[in-house]
Amino acid sequence: MNQQPEIVRVEGLKKTFRSGHAELVVFENLSFQVRKGEMLAIVGESGAGKSTLLHILGALDAPSAGDIYCAQTRLGTLSGSAAADFRNRQIGFVWQAHYLLPEFTAAENVAMPLLLRGTPQKQAQSSALDWLKEVGLSERGHHRAGELSGGEQQRVALARALITGPQLLMADEPTGDLDAHTADAVFNLIARLHREHRLTSLIVTHNLGFARRCDRVLRLERGSAVELLPAELPA
């Protein structure tokens, strides 16, 4: 059993959206915790709220009710600028779409979070090249992002997410746009970096094979969450 301290705690989370006069309830009284060093898979049917949950945990969206504590910070108390600073310092995001700037090189894309922090350009560029080596792209740093394959682009996105040394990695379907072989290689890379850099990782995925390789599974269904052990997932 993981005896590490909690790094994420969700208490009574409610999230609703309005559509005309109707109210769509995504979550109702959702509560769970994640301990430091865990790799948590978040699974569920399309429309279950997996991406919405990740946005709330990453201070990209606000809950309708409830408390969220992430990396010793109560997210509901943050102003817009404080939330942006929290994201930049504490969380690395990887999305299904890589969101790289195609006209910039791989190294320039990876360096961008450091430059936004005010890190000197030479230092940021050096760190970016180190991270590209870490993800197996040491020879691709000076290639424009648009010249890279899908798997390479996702590796660049992963390096960009981790260059600031975040406590948490949040990945929303990071292999969803990749073929099976490339997806497996990217997930293996995520798992290795998770271990070697002692991250806490929250991974939204439809791939139950990948979910089984995580420490725990959170399955979203009908506005609530069920916690599972990986072995309890269907084959």
Image (cartoon, rainbow, N blue to C red):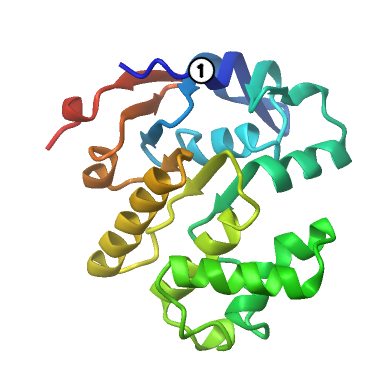
Q: Which residue is at 15% across, 33% downward?
A: 234
Q: Where does residue 28 sit, x and y in percent of width and height? A: 55, 15
Which part of the image, by quadrant, shows the N terminus? top left
Q: Which residue is at 55% across, 85% downward?
A: 146
Query: Which class describes the residues within 10 Å of circle 1: few (<14), some (14-19), or many (20+)?
Result: few
> What residue did someone put label 1 on?
5
Identify the image quadrant of residue 227: top left
Viewer can see residue 161: yes
Left or right: residue 150 compared with residue 212: right
Q: Which residue is at 73% across, 33% downward?
A: 20
Classify mark 1: helix, strand or loop: loop
Q: How many marks?
A: 1
Which part of the image, by quadrant, shows the C terminus? top left
Q: Where does residue 183 sit, x and y in percent of width and height? A: 31, 62
Identify the image quadrant of residue 145: bottom right
Left or right: residue 84 compared with residue 91: right
Left or right: residue 151 compared with residue 74: left
Residue 149 lies, with reference to residue 155, above or below; the image says: below
Residue 200 lies, with reference to residue 162, above or below; the image says: above
Of residues 69 and 35, the one nearer the viewer is 35
Residue 171 lies, with reference to residue 152, above or below; the image says: above
Viewer can see residue 97: no
Q: Which residue is at 45% across, 40% downward?
A: 198
Of residues 29 and 115, the one nearer the viewer is 115
Q: What amino acid does circle 1 point to?
A: Pro
Q: Where does residue 19 sit, x and y in percent of width and height? A: 68, 34
